[in-house]
Image (cartoon, rainbow, N blue to C red):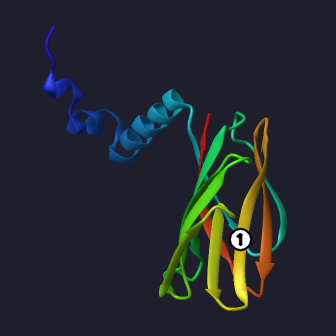
């Protein structure tokens, strides 16, 4: 039996399920098969933040973060598994860039305004972050949990 192009074409999915529903179902099916969980959150304070409802205990978490103003181009990309972490970040309104092994999330609007995080535990249904805030910053972040 050969590949049936009509049977698996995008237009065929669209006809049967509707465009948005077709893409959503294919995405849901793919994510369930991988065991990966993707979520997002916002933070503007120091202290502890528990992320739950992941559905499993992750082995590592990848973070994509941005200053909530977004116009200033401050962002970071990091990872953490409690024992090893790293981050690459652009800060001070996009004029500086750096990397390090101290945090998994790092957003700095300028001297006196920064929000950083480290992963402090991998829990049975998610993870816990510990945040340090200096001044005033709000971070929007997406997290990708791997089994």
Q: Secondary structure at mark 1?
A: strand
* Residue visible at 78% across and 78% down in the picture: 133
Total number of numbered discs in the rendering? 1
Q: Percent from the top left, x then y, of residue 92?
A: 56, 87
Whether residue 111 is situated above or below residue 45 in the rendered picture: below
Task: Report the quarter where the N terminus lies.
Answer: top left
For this orientation, the residue located farthest to the top is: 1
Q: Percent from the top left, x then y, of residue 50?
A: 81, 53
Whether residue 14 is situated above or below residue 74 in the rendered picture: above
Residue placed under numbered mark 1 in the picture = 116
Residue 66 or residue 134, whichever sits in front = 134
Residue 100 or residue 24, whichever sits in front = 100
| Left or right of 126 on screen, residue 36 | left
The image quadrant that residue 104 belongs to is: bottom right
| Left or right of 130 on screen, residue 88 | left
Q: Is residue 142 visible?
A: yes
For this orientation, the residue located farthest to the right is: 47
| Left or right of 49 on screen, residue 110 | left
The image quadrant that residue 112 belongs to is: bottom right
Q: Percent from the top left, x then y, of residue 34?
A: 50, 31
Q: Percent from the top left, x then y, of residue 142?
A: 58, 58
Q: Residues within 10 Å of mark 1 (few under 14, many from 20)?
A: many
* Residue visible at 67% across and 49% down in the picture: 84
Task: Report the quarter where the C terminus lies.
Answer: top right
* Residue visible at 15% across and 27% down in the picture: 6
């Amino acid at each position: 039996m050969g590949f049936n192009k009509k049977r698996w074409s995008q237009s065929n999915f669209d006809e049967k399920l509707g465009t948005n529903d077709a893409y959503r179902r294919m995405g849901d099916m793919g994510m369930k098969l991988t065991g990966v969980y993707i979520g997002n959150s916002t933070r503007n304070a120091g202290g502890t933040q528990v992320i739950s409802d992941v559905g499993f205990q992750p082995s590592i978490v990848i973070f994509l973060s941005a200053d909530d103003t977004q116009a200033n181009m401050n962002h970071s990309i990091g990872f953490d598994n409690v024992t090893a972490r790293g981050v690459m970040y652009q800060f001070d309104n996009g004029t500086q860039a750096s990397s390090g092994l101290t945090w998994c999330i790092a957003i700095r609007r300028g001297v006196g305004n920064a929000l950083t995080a480290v992963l402090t535990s991998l829990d049975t249904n998610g993870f816990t972050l510990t945040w340090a805030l200096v001044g005033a910053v709000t971070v929007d972040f997406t997290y990708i949990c791997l089994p």
